[in-house]
Amino acid sequence: MLTLKTIAAVGLSLALSGCAGFGNNVDYTAVAGNDFVSANYRAADALQTQLRGKLDGDKPLIMATIVNIDALEHSSMLGRVVSEQISTRLAQAGLPMLEMKLRNSVYLKRNQGELMLTRELGEVAGTHKAQAVVVGSYAETRDTIFINIKVIQPTTNLVLAGHDYVLAKQGTIRSMLVPD
């Protein structure tokens, strides 16, 4: 016969296990179907294709944080994640990407990433002997995010490669736009 303690223990464990998923309303099938990573990888692939024959294989590139076009000194989780994914994909293609978060001499705003304005490109690239800097911006509308990525030669400010793409402003992407 079951004792009161056993019944209470089983009831408590069932109640607690039922609460384990409470508040975790992530629909993983929707996230898995999200085109976010593949869209960023396609953008990096387009840049890499345009850069063939234009770069010295021994000199690094720097990835700046993608910024909000309406506030160039601000970014968001979206801008930082896009930057990370593009940098990762360019490195996967064999381009030498310099990880700026490990450098002390670059100004990092809390929660903003490596923000670089045009006037800073030459100075930062020269300090780190980078042959090019990947920069970009995004613009929000009610339903979409427009992203522009460019690879710029810092000594001349010439655009070596560029790519534009659009993301649907849905669930995950919308949540990444919350201001820091």
Image: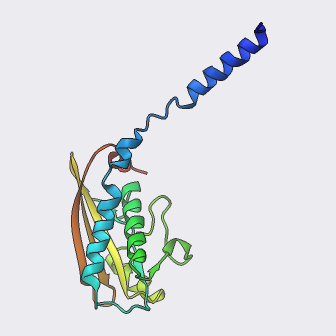
Q: Position of residue 136 (x, y in %)?
A: 30, 69
Q: Is residue 116 above or below residue 37?
A: below
39 vs 51: above or below: above
Q: Quadrant for residue 150, please give it.
A: bottom left
In-front residue for pair 155/152: 152
Residue 18, percent from left and from top: 57, 24
Residue drawn 72% across and 12% down? Answer: 7
Front residue of 113/86: it is: 86
- Left or right of 124? Residue 37 is left
Q: Check the image and tell me how it is coloured.
A: rainbow
Name which residue lies at 37% across and 93% down. Answer: 56
Above or below residue 149? Residue 28 is above
Residue 93, image x, y percentages: 38, 78
Name the side, left or right, on which 177 lies relative to 16. left
Determine whether 36 is above or below 87 in the image: above
Q: Residue at x 41, y 55 (%)?
A: 77
Q: Is residue 131 among the parts visible in the rendering? A: yes
Percent x, y of residue 116: 38, 73
